[in-house]
Image (cartoon, rainbow, N blue to C red):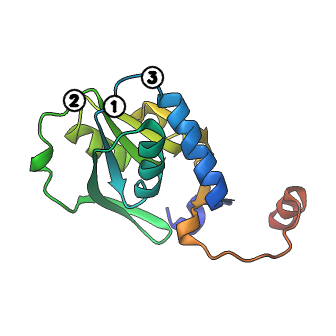
Amino acid sequence: MGTEDRYHKNFPVTWEQLHRDCRALAWRLMGRRPWERIIAVARGGLVPAAIVARELDVRLLDTVCVSSYTLRSQGEVQLLQDMAHLQGCSENWLIVDDLVDTGNTARVVRRMFPKAHFATVYSKPDGRPEVDTYVTEVSQDTWILFPWDAEIHVEFVSPIAQQQKSTS
């Protein structure tokens, strides 16, 4: 299925909304465990992991670098770095990503850190079973437009009801 067939809706996220949602994620995680380390799933999880780390006062951050997206399509998950230095995964480790979509990336990362708690800011139904905590669920056919992938500009936007009529 091509990207055009897969995504029928856009969900633009502003920097302010992302910050609020990351703080909400931190609130959900607060007090669950004494978090020892945060592992950000790079690249999308870098900004959320930094915000969550600040809010939870966790100073030990690492990254797992994987690639599965090219512009607006998802492909095969590729591990881009050796993770041998992160052996001995603890249940007090927290994995943070921006989004779980199909769950493909999450499955790869979870296999690497089976005891860690996996949290994302946004979740789609197909990937939802792969994460332990998330803040907002969106439909599978929605493309989440993150602020680091967008330019800021102001323009008129039609009401949702009118947009639906024009695509029908």
Amino acid type of the residue that numbered disc 2 sits on in the rendered structure: Ser
Whichever of callouts 1 and 2 sits on the residue coming sooner in the sequence is: 1
Amino acid type of the residue that numbered disc 1 sits on in the rendered structure: Trp
Label 2 residue SS: loop
- Kindly tell me whether residue 101 is visible in this rendering: no
Query: What x and y, as percent, mark residue 22?
Result: 54, 45
- Rounded to the nearest whole Å, what is the CA distance between mark 2 and mark 3? 16 Å
In the image: residue 165, left or right of residue 41: right
Label 1 residue SS: loop
Residue carrying label 3 = 31
Amino acid type of the residue that numbered disc 3 sits on in the rendered structure: Gly
- Rounded to the nearest whole Å, what is the CA distance between mark 1 and mark 2? 10 Å
Residue carrying label 2 = 90
| The quarter of the displayed image where residue 168 is located | bottom right
Residue carrying label 1 = 35
Which residue corresponds to the image point at 49% horizontal and 61% vertical from the top-left?
1
